[in-house]
Image (cartoon, rainbow, N blue to C red):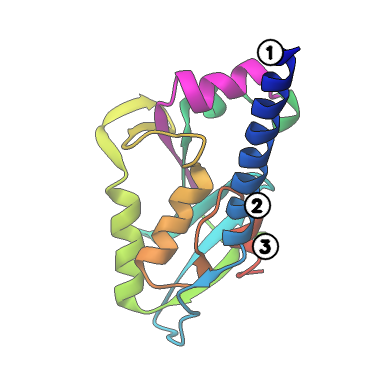
């Protein structure tokens, strides 16, 4: 009986800790940082597929969409409906290697969200993006090996949020989700 009571007590404490962590992470999604730029000098775009945000920069008369994320997600999960628990575990715990996906477009897409900014802010975002991967380490046609590791607490959306915060643009204090970024630019 003592073991059963002790187990129940530990389980309650564990559940309380989990609830507190989830409540803290959820609440910081709603704390804004930075501000909307009043400058019309430059602009870049964000695109949200419902789970993941890409940063889109106009470079050399084309638009390049940069998506930083898990190698496992990028190479093995074609749709999030096909995500399994074992794949999720590998992506965030056992195989945290990251890639930078670069997709090029010749024209703007209607689903993109415009982010107005100063030239200095654009350069900060561009520098952040370009310093996040290795140009010389190509994984395949659209993917380069990226710096840092995808983790349970640092996701593709955390990476995008970091770019916005570095430039002093409107962003949540902390995020794991795409919607907490997109809500500012829809």
Instruction: Look at 69% across and 48% down and name the residue there.
Output: 50
Residue pointed to by mark 1: 3
Position of residue 2 relative to residue 35, above or below, is: above
Which residue position holds label 3?
Answer: 110
Within 10 Å of disc 2 (Cα), the crowding (few <14, some 14-19, many 20+) is few
Pointer 1 local density, CA inside 10 Å: few below 14, some 14–19, many at least 20: few
- The answer to whether residue 178 is above or below residue 19 is below
Looking at the rendered image, the quarter that the N terminus falls into is top right
What segment is highlighted magenta in the picture?
83-104
Name the quadrant of the C terminus: bottom right
- The x, y position of residue 155, in whole percent, is 50, 41
Is 114 located above or below residue 156 in the figure?
below
Residue corresponding to mark 2: 23
Callout 3: 10 Å neighbours few (<14), some, many (20+)?
few
Say if mark 2 contacts mark 1, CB within 8 Å: no
Q: Secondary structure at mark 2?
A: helix
Which residue occupies 47% across, 57% down? Answer: 161
The CA distance from mark 2 to mark 3 is 35 Å
Give whichever of 179, 100 is nearer the camera.
179
Q: Residue at x 53, y 29 (%)?
A: 74
């Amino acid at each position: 009986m003592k073991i059963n009571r002790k187990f129940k007590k530990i389980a309650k404490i564990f559940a309380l800790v989990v609830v507190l962590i989830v409540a803290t992470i959820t609440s910081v999604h709603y704390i804004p940082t930075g501000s909307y730029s009043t400058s019309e000098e430059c602009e870049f775009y964000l695109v949200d597929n419902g789970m993941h945000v890409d940063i889109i920069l106009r470079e050399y008369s084309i638009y390049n969409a940069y998506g930083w994320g898990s190698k496992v997600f990028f190479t093995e999960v074609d749709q999030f409906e096909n995500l399994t628990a074992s794949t999720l575990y590998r992506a965030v715990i056992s195989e945290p290697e990251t890639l930078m996906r670069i997709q090029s477009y010749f024209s703007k897409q209607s689903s993109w969200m415009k982010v107005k900014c100063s030239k200095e802010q654009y350069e900060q975002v561009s520098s952040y993006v370009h310093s996040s991967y290795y140009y010389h380490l190509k994984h395949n046609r659209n993917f380069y090996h990226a710096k840092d590791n995808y983790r349970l607490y640092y996701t593709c959306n955390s990476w995008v949020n970091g770019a916005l915060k570095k430039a002093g643009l409107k962003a949540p204090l902390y995020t794991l989700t795409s919607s907490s970024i997109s809500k500012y630019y829809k």
